[in-house]
Amino acid sequence: MEHVFDAVIVGAGQAASLAGPLTKAGWTVALVEKRWLGGTCVNVGCTPTKAMVASAKAAYTAAHAGEFGVLGGADVRVDLKKVKARKDAIVLNFRSKNEAAFASMKGCTLFHGIGRFEAPDRLRVGDDVLSSKHFFLNVGARPRIPKMPGIDDVAFLTSTTILDLEVLPEHLIVVGGSYVGLEFAQMFRRFGSKVTVVEKGATLLGHEDNDVCGGITEILEAEDIALRFHAECLALARGPSGVVVHVGCKDGSPEIHGSHVLLAVGRDPNTDDLGLELAGLSANSQGFVEVDDQLRTPIEGIWALGDCNGRGGFTHTSYNDADIVAADVLDGGSRRATDRIPIHALYTDPPLAQVGMNERQVRERGRPALMGIRQMSTIGRAIEKGETHGFMKVLVDAETQEILGGTILGVGGDEAIHCIATAMYARQPASLLARSVHIHPTVAELIPTVFQDLQPLVP
């Protein structure tokens, strides 16, 4: 059966919020989703993982209650089945709200199934053919399965399948020392598993500043998480306890025996089954659909949003993509992807938050700059909470006083970073924050102090 719509949105992830302004403007919209409404974030990403991070935090706090004068049993045990049940209930609540929102949206029709182009203006979903002058690709991404020896011989976990575990791994080996891998590593160590992180590079989070990499390393090692670097010869094999990871590291044993292995080596966009070639499009070498600054593809009438366009890969950038496209098609194109300031967080405990440029990028730019830094161990609120790992750091252009970026590794950093982000969006100089008055006692109250203590960034 053929249907004609003003717009077709392929994928019901976060950028599918575009359906709201389009239907309010009187457009008829088809929303195509092959699995769950809400996309990665709600179903297998932010929502479930942060719910489990909260359970892990509760376990850690209970185990360390004696440090706060709270007496209790030292033998803290985690029931992973109950952790999963709590997580599942939260996910179902969020998913149900998404389903209700789209179901009540006048002018929006939901199609379940895989969408595949037949032409630039036509998409097939099962027996239905959707015709439109406007297609918005929002197909998201999935965990990357690397090509490595033994991958077909061993049962492995991904960031999606690990969410379904109901029994704790005895020894979880995490392959990949970046954001996803480190969150799960700390989480399962706090649940009670032995954990080893295997990283091909020389450090964790190799794209971050050296002090950030070092700080995260110290935090994880303090919780008895084993770290193995220079793992340049990765291979998997079956072992007596479950799995063997051959690492070929320069230091230490050349293999690690564990009960479970989690592959956390990145994500691939879900663009391979879209039939892009029939729409006149192609994905680049990484699988992304390339777009311009207004998220338009080279084919008129087709946009790409969210994880599949290579412009962010975060929930907040996906939402922003929807705002940009709505402005483009409804208001004459007044917004662009380059208007936004890069901002992201790693949800270890304590978290890492970063906005704008980091120190490495500022140094590469080559212009004179100023830097302020403050250790969390000097911040009253952190001391009172007993969470003194990390630091905050800000970077400023020495000639213009433009705020270039900020990093907070420490308790509350994922919230406090927005003080800096807001000033950057307002295009205010560093003096604005240096003269601000923040509530005491908070972590954010030290942001003005950091801006008051700027020093030249030495080569």
Image (cartoon, rainbow, N blue to C red):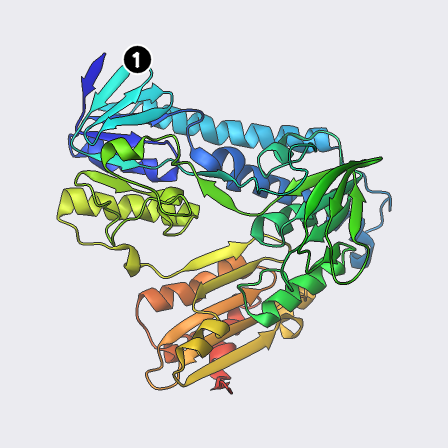
- The secondary structure type at the circle numbered 1 is loop
Residue 151, position in %: x, y? Answer: 65, 37
Tell me which amino acid carries mark 1. Answer: Asp
Q: Residue at x 17, y 42 (%)?
A: 329
Q: Quadrant of residue 97?
A: top left
Along the viewing direction, whichever of 240 and 137 lies nearer the viewer = 240
Q: Residue at x 70, y 52 (%)?
A: 197
Is the residue marked by circle 1 packed among few (<14), some (14-19), or many (20+) residues within 10 Å? few
Quadrant assignment for the N terminus: top left
Q: Quadrant of residue 250?
A: bottom right
Horizontally, residue 280 falls left or right of residue 404, namely left
Q: Quadrant of residue 213?
A: bottom right
Toward the left, the furthest residue is 332
Asked whether residue 386 is in view, the answer is: no
Report which residue position mark 1 lands on.
127
Q: Residue at x 52, y 60 (%)?
A: 353
**Numbered circles on residues, count:** 1
Horizontally, residue 119 falls left or right of residue 404, namely left
Residue 392, position in %: x, y? Answer: 55, 71
Q: Residue at x 33, y 59 (%)?
A: 340
Residue 390, position in %: x, y? Answer: 63, 67
Along the viewing direction, whichever of 166 and 75 lies nearer the viewer = 166
Horizontally, residue 139 falls left or right of residue 281, namely right
